[in-house]
Amino acid sequence: MDILDLAGLTAIHQRTDEASQTRIVYAEITDQPEKTNTCPHCGAVNSVRRHGISRHNYHDVPLRGRVVIIEMKLRRFQCQRCRKVFRQAPAGMDRKRSMTTRCVEWIRQQSLRAPFSQVAEESGCSERVVREIADEYIKEQNDNYRPSMPHWLGIDEIYLEGRVEGPLCLLVDLENSQVIDILSDCRMDTLVSWLSSFNETSKLRGVCMDMCEIYRRAVKRVFPDAEIMIDKFHVVRWANKAVDIVRLRVGKLHSSERHVDDRKSCRPLLRKQRHSLSAREREVLDGYLSRHQEIATAYYLKEDFFNIYKCGSRSDATKALDKWERSVTGSMRPAFRELLKALVKWRVEILAQFENEKTLACTEAINSQVHDVSRAREGYSFEVLRGRLLFGRKAHRPLNGGRAA
């Protein structure tokens, strides 16, 4: 069996350079005539003359962890009309680079899954060549990419460490938990332009997002009939933050060593919902709350707010929310100020979740994937980052990541 498995080429023999972990395969062309009659540069016929023989190396797909080089003797020709010199063009070789077409395709696929430096090392090519092939592939994929508007759209932002241009804007199909697109910024004109590129105005039923006025205005401008709802996590986090405010305020009044120890051990317990605590955790937390009545009040207000999301209908949730707002009195109001303000400004959108039960939970898995790509190789351009997210292997799998409230 021919080790190359390339039409028109036959392997004569091979050797392995152990120092560089390179397998060199010597091959010869078996399906081309000794002489060509047409110049590929000027198209002149019967003006081509032989011009010697040269050795040429082509990179192939790596095999068993080794770089593969195909070495061949190629005839050189010269056109008597344009005086340009050219050589044989073996079948299965890329026209632009000294590598096989299957090696180019392998680099195209791997460049969206692994760091460019790793792909370069495995293939034996330079990192610049890998980057060029990846850029060409991403541009080709972008030209052919035609996303469709889902029934439920998720909008979220991604903050990358060291990125001075600001957060990226992530667009997600919530029903299939898949990325639709990623935008270079979260400006209103950018989002409006993206939303306006779709003609399927009747397909979009609703949008799930955080409490961002820019997102709300952009959606309403392009899809005025789409329902907007606020992701549960972005609401309940204000309740947890309120408990932290009270805890820190009480902590300033109690500097004893025991209280400091209590704060360290009970902080994670305060963020948990009571039904998720173990018997031992509940005993520890109850002891802590019994010693600090103000923190206990904030904690049980937080628990009552979380329980609103257990309501089975929008009408029940509205009644429970009204009752909860009336229960926030006295010294608790400053701590819960941000949550109370959000309930006024975003009340309709917050209550909309009790009818649709859509969340941005899957964006956490996408966020993690983007951060992994960014950390794997600093200096990726936005186009490469977007291409790896949209067209890489993981992009075609549903993302079932979630986050607890």
Image: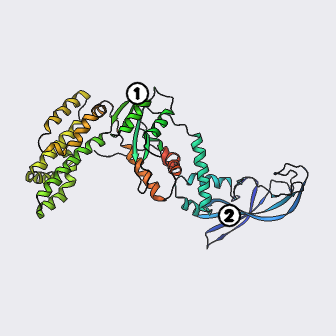
Q: Quadrant of the N terminus?
A: bottom right
| Label annotation for residue 69 | 2
> Residue 220, percent across and down?
40, 31
Q: Looking at the image, do the residues carrying marks 2 and 1 touch, with CB atoms under 8 Å apart?
A: no
* Residue position marked by numbered label 1 in the rendering: 224
Q: Is residue 64 visible?
A: no
Instruction: Single out the residue that lies furthest toward the bottom.
Output: 19
355 relative to 395, above or below: above
Q: Is residue 234 visible?
A: yes
Label 1: which secondary element: loop
Q: For the point 60% across and 49% down, which residue is it? A: 137
Instruction: Specify the quadrant of the image occupied by residue 84.
Output: bottom right
Q: For the point 45% across and 25% down, which residue is it? A: 202
> Is residue 292 left or right of 351 when viewed as pictured?
left
253 relative to 296, above or below: below
> Is residue 368 left or right of 296 when viewed as pictured?
right
| Label annotation for residue 123 | none
Q: For the point 47% across and 46% down, which residue is it? A: 184
